[in-house]
Amino acid sequence: MNIEFTWPWLFAALPLPLLALLLPRARRAEPATLRFPFYAALRDNLQTHTGQRSRLRLALATAAWLLLVLAAARPQLIGESVHLPVSGRSLMLAVDISGSMQNEDMQVRGRQLSRLTAVKVVAGDFIEQRKGDRIGLILFGDEAYLQAPLTFDRQTVRILLDEAQIGLAGQQTAIGDAIGLAIKRLRKEPDSNRVLILLTDGANTAGNVDPLKAADLAAREGVRIYTIGIGSGETVVQTPFGPRRVATGDLDEGNLKAIAEKTGGRYFRARDTAQLAQIYDLLDRIEPISEDEQTWRPVDELYVWPLGSALLLSVLIALAAAYRRRATAPRSEVSHA
């Protein structure tokens, strides 16, 4: 660690107060005085105390000026270099939060959980592993919403995914709108680094954009789409006649496969969390993490400390001057005869 100054040339202002010595002193009218027999002794006493106070005020003012110039030069504490792996890929996750995602046909460690909960568990781990990638999050139901723009802050993206609730965006599924929003957000990224991972358990039942037309646009924009169909397709319910398997969801695998093929991606089927985790492992191989690194050095601003100290000294000087004026103010005027 070392300290550096952003504007070191401001130290040239240090001698500016010395210019005050070159200015002519203002003339002061001689105040009316009253002669006392012990005037000489009183004068010597006052001059002694006044000289001491003047030297103290000068020292405080000098220290305040030095601190102000130091703060103006903007000192910074530069930390040790931190190496960050960078892949350069921009990954957008589009997660279905429609009503059907509450179906509890996914198993996590022997527990029956809803589809959205299973996605949060596995997708969260996937986000944590994507060091060096910029991750964005889209949630969609009746409409598609950008929950997190592309960012290196994986922790925040995971928190936003964990906070997603079923039905917040409506009960239906707007797959085409989600793809369209992802294209808009990925358009400014480098052509080879635009990736959309779309997770849904249903067919397109809402929105203004046809999913296949959105896929054609994605192909023209160089966005590769990996589609993942969520859900086992059936669940076990208890009936008066015992447990019974019931079909759940209306997953349109044909459309999801077509979307992936049009954009150069792939379609995956996730019937449980184990398959979903395997899919993410496969995506790591398809979209590998680069070994390149970026160097970053943390910077802490230090100017607040000398600036605060200078302001404190200025307040002390002002208070001392006010006290001195009150202490030396005459209680009654005496005129010289």
Image (cartoon, rainbow, N blue to C red):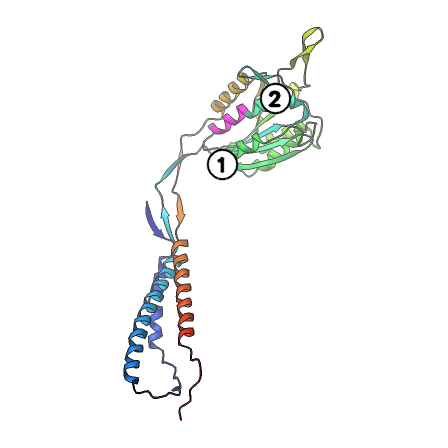
**Quadrant of the snapshot with the C terminus:** bottom left
Q: Which residues are magenta?
A: 121-128
Query: Which of 45/311 is in front?
Result: 45
- Residue 292 falls in image quadrant: top left
Kindly report the secondary structure that dominates the magenta region of the rendered protein: helix
Q: Could you tell me residue 117's position as x and y percent?
A: 58, 24
Query: Which of 121/27 is in front?
Result: 27
Compared with 99, 221 (above or below) is: below
- Residue 5 falls in image quadrant: bottom left
Magenta stretch: includes residue 125: yes
Can the viewer see residue 217?
A: no
Q: Could you tell me residue 20's position as x and y percent?
A: 36, 74
Q: Which residue is mark 2?
A: 115
**Quadrant of the snapshot with the N terminus:** top left
Disc 1 crowd rating (10 Å Cα; few below 14, some 14-19, many 20+) is: some
Magenta stretch: includes residue 112: no
Q: Which residue is mark 1?
A: 153
Q: Could you tell me residue 294's position as x and y percent?
A: 40, 37
Which residue occupies 65% across, 23% down?
102
Q: Could you tell me residue 65's position as x and y percent?
A: 36, 64
- Residue 39 falls in image quadrant: bottom left
Q: Amino acid at mark 2?
A: Arg
Which residue occupies 44% across, 80% down?
331
Query: Which of 288/68 is in front?
Result: 68
Q: Secondary structure at mark 2?
A: helix
Compared with 140, 12 (above or below) is: below
Can the viewer see residue 99?
A: yes
Which residue occupies 33% across, 72% down?
54
Q: Secondary structure at mark 1?
A: loop
Which numbered dot is residue 266? Answer: none
